[in-house]
């Protein structure tokens, strides 16, 4: 089970961070970042499986890859933003974390404009 490995990495990182806080607290952020990267790498196979499924569904429906690319960009931005926000909060920088969070949301909204436009056009065409 993949989740057991992920939890194991998290707990090991937590133990290392607790020990490091006593002696070298400035290194705890590095352990946190490394653990986060390791966990992200561990779930990349599942993420690739989802991408492959979405690609095959897109090919079957003939909707084109434009919307799929937008959805993947949005997902990537959301994941990276959450990762950066968590690191900032772990470092005690909640003000910077909230700015990164806001920036991620604004970028996601701006990237999703073509999808919103297409949905509105579809609704307008359906209505009499």
Image: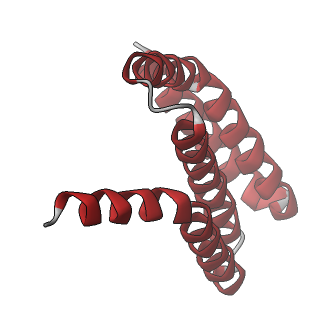
Q: Which of the pair 112/96 is nearer the observer?
A: 112
Q: Which of the pair 121/6 is nearer the observer?
A: 121
Residue 110's spot in the image, x, y percent? 61, 70
Residue 44's spot in the image, x, y percent? 61, 24
Residue at position x 51%, y 21% in the image: 55
Q: Is residue 123 above or below residue 57?
A: below
Q: Residue furthest left?
A: 128
Q: Which of the pair 49/40 is nearer the observer?
A: 49
Q: Is residue 21 above or below residue 66?
A: below
Where's the C terminus, which quadrant?
Answer: bottom left
Q: Is residue 77 above or below residue 120?
A: above
Q: Is residue 11 above or below residue 113?
A: above
Where's the N terminus, which quadrant?
Answer: top left
Q: Which of the pair 31/84 is nearer the observer?
A: 84
Q: Is residue 96 left or right of 3 when viewed as pictured?
A: right
Q: Residue furthest front?
A: 128
Q: Residue furthest bottom?
A: 95
Q: How is the image coloured?
A: secondary structure
Q: Quadrant of residue 38?
A: top right
Residue at position x 67%, y 42% in the image: 36
């Amino acid at each position: 089970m993949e989740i057991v490995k992920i939890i194991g990495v998290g707990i090991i990182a937590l133990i290392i961070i607790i020990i490091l806080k006593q002696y070298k607290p400035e290194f705890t952020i590095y352990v946190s970042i490394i653990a986060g990267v390791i966990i992200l790498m561990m779930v990349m196979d599942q993420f690739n499986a989802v991408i492959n499924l979405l690609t095959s569904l897109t090919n079957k429906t003939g909707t084109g890859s434009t919307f799929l690319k937008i959805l993947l960009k949005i997902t990537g931005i959301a994941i990276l933003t959450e990762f950066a926000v968590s690191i900032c909060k772990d470092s005690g920088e909640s003000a910077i974390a909230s700015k990164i969070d806001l920036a991620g949301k604004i970028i996601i909204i701006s990237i999703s404009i073509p999808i919103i436009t297409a949905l509105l056009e579809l609704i307008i065409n359906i209505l009499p």
